[in-house]
Image (tube, grey):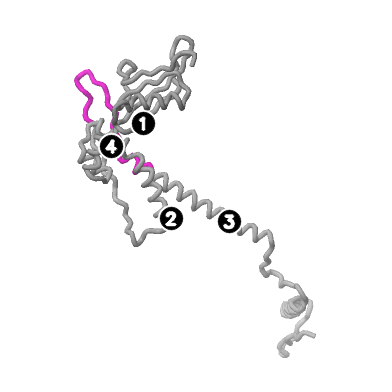
Amino acid sequence: MYPVQSPPVSEKRSPLSDRWFLDQIAAVMQQFQRSQPGSQVPGAPRHSGHEDLTARAARLSAQRARLEQEEAALQADVERLNHALVPTPARSSDSGPAPRPARSAPVPHLDIGADDLTLTEAGRIRRAYKVTEAALPRLVLEAAADGFDAPAIARDLAVTPSYVYRILRERVRYSWRLDVRDGGTWAVRSSGQDVVDRALGSDTRLAEKLLAESGADRVLLWEGARTTDAKATLDLARPEGT
């Protein structure tokens, strides 16, 4: 039997109308349910396989959100570093030559110390660094073509002026366009640019490589920025029937 507390003897209570008796009955029922194997007290939290799956899905969703944030941050780092110099396009004018483009703003320093760097941040910076290193020769040559001097380029790219001078001396940028035959005319297939070592015949070697890899019928090559077909540095066409 389960103990039931007696009401104060000074008052007369009716089981049908007094809340005190109802509370005592409920307490006895709860004690009985607790004594049964595998029972749960009403209102107690229950754990199920469904709740486990829900919790796991929430963790995976949070993980995915963190990865997306890291990917977006890495992309922002790459774009900021890869486009440290943003050349202003030249505009034609009847009154004289196009004005020299305004100097770009210097890349801001990373506001973080080596002791505070986390594993994730270090990975992002190293990946961005590799992408930026591959783009540096192109950026140097583009900036020089737009009128920036070597010290200014070096400051914006956080490199030494000697590095910039070496790129200008040893590398060359070619713009190219691939054409295919369309009846008696040429149709443009694609265009792009490449930075290669400056050497005798470097334009011919690049043009031959582009023709072989693309299967196009003609390649036009310009040193530096592309202008008009008549000013192409090289016009190399594949013989008909080959």
- Kind of residue at badge 4: Val
Q: Quadrant of the N terminus?
A: bottom right
Residue 194 circle label: 1
Point out the residue furthest to the top here.
184
| Residue 17 in view | no
Mark 4 and mark 2 lie on one chain; the one further toward the N terminus is 2
Tell me if 203 is positioned left or right of 190 in this view. Answer: left
Amino acid type, residue under disc 1 in the picture: Asp
User: Element under label 2?
Assistant: helix
Residue type marked 2:
Thr
Q: Secondary structure at mark 4?
A: helix
**What's the distance in space between the residues labelled 4 and 3, CA to CA?**
47 Å
Stretch of the chain drawn in magenta: 78-100
Q: Amino acid at mark 3?
A: Ala
Neighbour tally class for label 2: few under 14, some 14-19, many 20 plus, Cα within 10 Å: few
Residue located beneath label 4 in the image: 140
Residue sitting nearer the eye, 216 or 212: 212
Between marks 1 and 3, how big is the CA–CA gap? 46 Å
> From the viewer's perspective, is the residue at label 4 or at label 3 nearer?
4
Mark 4 or mark 1: name the one nearer the start of the chain: 4
Q: How many other residues sit within 10 Å of disc 4, few (<14), some (14-19) or many (≥20)? A: many
Mark 1 or mark 3, which is nearer to you? 1
Residue at the location (72% across, 72% down)? 40
Q: Are marks 1 and 3 in contact (CB under 8 Å)?
A: no
Which residue is identified by label 2?
A: 120
Task: Kindly indicate the quadrant of the structure image that contains residue 59.
Answer: bottom right
Q: Which mark is residue 58?
A: 3
Q: Are marks 1 and 2 in contact (CB under 8 Å)?
A: no
The location of residue 30, given as percent across then percent down, is 74, 76
Q: Closer to the N terminus: mark 4 or mark 3?
A: 3
223 vs 188, left or right, is left
Q: In the visual, does 67 lie left or right of 141?
A: right
